[in-house]
Amino acid sequence: MVTDIQPERSIRVLRVGQRYVRDDRTLTHLCLVSRALGAEAIYLEDAEKDVTGTLEEVNRTWGGEFGATLGASWRKVIGEAKKEGRSVVHLTMYGLPIQDVVEELRKLDKILIVVGGPKVPGKVYHEADFNIAVTSQPHSEVAALAIALHEIQSGEELKRKFPKSKLRILPTAHGKRVVEN
Ligand SMILES: C[S@@+](CC[C@H](N)C(=O)[O-])C[C@H]1O[C@@H](n2cnc3c(N)ncnc32)[C@H](O)[C@@H]1O
């Protein structure tokens, strides 16, 4: 039960790309950022099973039901998103500045945010409903995703609650306070 600031909005994430080098740390970070910042699930074209193991442990400890699907091709995920009326928002430095289109993005109730890895097939740019840049400078899919999630949800995702957690943090100005539920 996500506190449900905007319960009507459903955001999923797709990471396109096969790896050249092992980058499970980046994939894990994409999962953790998606989960923490209000997405409900992520699709990873290419990842090791231990990425989902890590996520299951995070869900058990910190709550929520964030889901990860491994091995689904980008074509299939984008095709299915379109069939269910989900808007495809591809993050790329070549796209339109997010600040110019964010009002339009906030009106969408079902979104698939697509991020790339080392190389994104040209067709993804054409299949996307929106090609969106978080600055027109190269940086990172993790940073672009975090900022896009934050902008689209107007910061409301920061208040999200994660149900059925084993542990809960009591925010404190100094030190660490964690309680068992
Ligand atoms: C290593 S970057 C590759 C940069 C790539 N040339 C591009 O099209 O953005 C991997 C991914 O990070 C995301 N990314 C990087 N810089 C971005 C930016 N300025 N705006 C939006 N997304 C960005 C994109 O999803 C990209 O596919």
Image (spheres, rainbow, N blue to C red):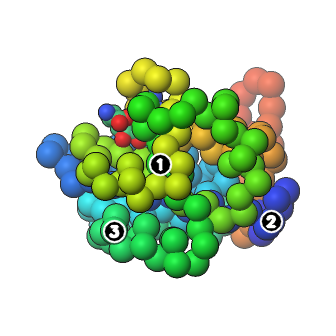
Q: At 34% across and 64% down in the image, what residue appears?
A: 74
Secondary structure type for disc 2: loop
- Residue 137, percent across and down? 43, 21
Q: x and y percent of residue 174 in the render?
A: 76, 24
Which element type, helix, strand or loop, lies under badge 1? strand
* Residue drawn at the location 47% of the way across and 35% of the way down: 95
Residue 116 x, y percent position in the rendering: 35, 46
Q: Which image quarter is the N terminus in?
A: bottom right
* The image quarter in which residue 180 lies: bottom right
Q: Is residue 174 visible?
A: yes
Label 2 neighbourhood size at 10 Å, few (<14), some (14-19), many (20+)? few
Which residue is denoted by mark 3 in the rendering? 75
What amino acid is at disc 2? Pro
Q: Among all residues in the image, which is located at the extreme front? A: 126
**What is the CA distance from the residue labelled 3 to the residue labelled 2?**
27 Å
Q: Is mark 1 within 8 Å of ligand 1?
A: yes
Locate residue 27 relative to residue 132 in the image: left or right.
Answer: left
User: If you read the primary sequence from the N terminus, does the residue marked by circle 3 or circle 2 appear first?
Assistant: 2
User: Which comes sooner in the sequence, label 1 or label 2?
Assistant: 2
Residue type at mark 3 is: Arg
CA gap, disc 1 and disc 2: 23 Å
Mark 1 to mark 3 CA distance (whole Å): 13 Å
Query: On the image, numbered disc 2 is attached to which residue?
Result: 7
Determine which of the numbered discs, if any, sits on residue 90 in the image: 1
Q: Are marks 3 and 2 in contact (CB under 8 Å)?
A: no
- In the figure, 23 relative to 67: above or below? above
Q: Amino acid at mark 1?
A: His
Sequence-first disc among 1 and 3: 3
